[in-house]
Each structure stands twice: as C-alpha cells, then as structure tokens.
C-alpha cells in the first residue's frame, strides 16, 4: 500500500494500491502531535488492504488538513527553494554528526549503500 | 473534497521551464500493476514500513542530496526521540517536531498494541527519495528494498513517500 499526498504523481506512477491523503507535502501520514487523527488515517489506510480488489486503485481519504485550503495555492514559489544537490551529508544537528562519527551504531551499521539482504541475514541469524 | 488537489506535475513542469531547467521526464506506468491479494487478516500480518522522507536514527550516517540511493534500517522499537530528518526537498519542520508525519512509527506501534495489526518487521526501511533517475530507483533501490522485505518476512508493506 502506498500512501500519497500527490494525487497526480501517484496516478502517473500507478502503484498496485494507494490511499490519497490531501495534505501538504511533508505530511503524508498525518499532522504533527495529533496522534488521534493520525490513528484514524492509518486505520483507514490499513482497511484499504482488506477492501481493495482492483490493481491500480487509489482510495481518496476523507481527512482535511484545515478548513482553509489556501495552502494549495502556495505554489512552488518563484525560484528553486530546494537546497543545492551535493554529496555532503546533511545532519539534523551537529550532535548527530558526532554520534555517527563515533560509530556508536557500528555493530548494526545500517547506513551504507553496499548493504544487502545477505549481510542483513548474517545479523539476524538464529 | 472541497477543492481539487494540487497539480504537482503541472506546477513543477512549469517551474522547471521558468528556471531554464531541462524538462523532467515523469514516469507514467500505463500497464496494470501487479497484484497480490492479502494473505492473512491484518491482525495476523507483519507490516514493513518503507519511507522516503530522509529519516535516520541518531548515530547513523545522514543522507546527502545528490541522488542518494542508500538505505537505512531503523529498528522498529526505536525511541521516537532518536529519529532525525535529513531532506533537501520538503520543509522538515513538522517532521522534526513529530516524525510520525512522514514515518508513522508510533501510529503503527499503537495499532499493534490495539491488536488491529499483527506486528511490525524488525526494521523499517528509509531512504532519501529525490533520486533523479527513475531507472536507478527501478533497478537499484526497489530490488534492494524488496530483498529486505523478504529477509524480514514481511506480509505487507506500507510505503510512505513525501
């Protein structure tokens, strides 16, 4: 099941099952610190596993971000407001960078693109 | 719905043209997608959470923004306060206040406790998204994720793109 907040993109990608939650990007699964509504969204999402019968279905969920729909008109802005694309690692905080460099999670290092299910099985053996 | 949803493809295409960028080749999959019926009731199913919001766990290496195809495995018993967000393309303000908006881990754990969902795989899988080449997603990222889903014996998968 794919959750989506971008109906046109999800229609184009055409996954087997999807639910569309009409929220601003960055909120596919709900609202910050609103666990009750997020629970409802997830229950509706999981129910769709049981009710959908047709490949390519997209169920439109009934939740609303706010009664005011002005967020839909904010647009992409005049310029490109995304950060430039570089290979520099972007940590949320400097403390995270230090923690990663200290290799606190080295044993379960889960970070690297050269990991494979085979190496994963080694960790979960038994 | 009171108002039609945002047309992202049209607005991004228009913005790229205005900025003088090369047009992006959107993916249009017109074949009927594959279909696997639900094999067990939800209350007995093990769910794998797969999210592209750039979530990592404190202590893991963060993501970068140039076609980062790497994955992070996040233990599903992770402390929520150890979750971090690293992303170049969306405003992470709310995801940093509450990762559940793009990585619904507490939401899912709650439904497991309630008995509505059987359980979660040992790890959730996260990545950056924003990978410019759909070929690399199809040929590198997706098969790797599928391998993990099998290794973790997932019955169902929930994909949460941003």
Image (tube, coloured by chain):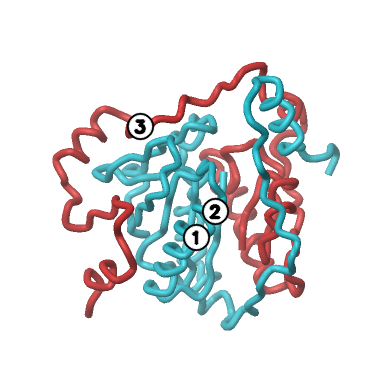
Mark 2 residue crowding within 10 angstroms, few (<14) / some (14–19) / many (20+): few
Q: Which chain is cyan?
A: B
| Numbered label attached to residue B135 | 2
Distance of label 2 from label 3 (alpha carbons): 25 Å
Q: Which residue is mark 3?
A: A90
B16 vs B102, nearest the viewer: B16
Chain letter of disc 1?
Answer: B
Quadrant position of the C terminus of chain B in the picture: top right
Residue in the image at 41% along x and 38% along y: B85
Q: Which chain is red?
A: A
| Numbered label attached to residue B139 | 1
User: Does label 1 lie on the same chain as label 2?
Assistant: yes
Could you tell me if the residues under marks 2 and 1 are in contact, i.e. CB atoms within 8 Å?
Answer: yes
Please state the horizontal and vertical placement of residue A58, each as a whole percent of the image.
74, 59
A85 vs A100, nearest the viewer: A85
Residue in the image at 66% along x and 72% along y: B34
Chain letter of disc 2?
Answer: B
Horizontal relation, residue A109 to residue B36: left or right: left
Which tag is nearer the camera, tag 3 or tag 1? 1
Horizontal relation, residue B124 to residue B37: left or right: left
Quarter assignment of residue B68 = top left
Please state the horizontal and vertical placement of residue B123, each as a whole percent of the image.
36, 62
Residue in the image at 37% along x and 73% along y: B151
């Amino acid at each position: 099941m794919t959750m989506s907040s971008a109906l046109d993109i999800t229609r184009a990608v055409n996954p087997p099952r999807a639910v569309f939650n009409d929220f601003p990007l960055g909120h596919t699964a709900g609202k910050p610190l609103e666990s009750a509504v997020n629970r409802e969204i997830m229950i509706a999402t999981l129910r769709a596993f049981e009710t959908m019968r047709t490949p390519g279905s997209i169920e439109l969920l009934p939740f609303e971000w706010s009664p005011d729909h002005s967020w839909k008109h904010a647009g992409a802005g005049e310029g490109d407001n995304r950060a430039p694309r570089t290979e520099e690692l972007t940590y949320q905080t400097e403390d995270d960078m230090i923690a990663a460099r200290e290799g606190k999670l080295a044993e379960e290092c889960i970070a690297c693109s050269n990991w494979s299910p085979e190496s994963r099985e080694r960790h979960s053996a038994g | 719905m009171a108002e039609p949803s945002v047309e992202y493809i049209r607005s991004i295409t228009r913005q790229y043209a205005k900025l003088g960028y090369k047009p992006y080749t959107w993916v249009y999959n017109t074949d009927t997608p594959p279909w696997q019926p639900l094999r067990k009731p939800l209350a007995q199913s093990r769910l794998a959470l797969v999210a592209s919001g750039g979530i990592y766990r404190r202590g893991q290496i963060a993501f970068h923004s140039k076609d980062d195809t790497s994955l992070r495995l996040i233990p599903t018993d992770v402390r929520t306060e150890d979750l971090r967000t690293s992303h170049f393309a969306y405003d992470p303000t709310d995801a940093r206040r509450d990762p559940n908006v793009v990585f619904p881990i507490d939401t899912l754990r709650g439904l497991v406790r309630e008995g509505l969902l059987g359980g979660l795989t040992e790890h959730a899988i996260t990545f950056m998204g924003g990978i410019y080449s759909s070929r690399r997603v199809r040929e590198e990222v997706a098969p790797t994720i599928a391998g993990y889903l099998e290794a973790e014996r997932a019955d169902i998968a929930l994909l949460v793109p941003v």
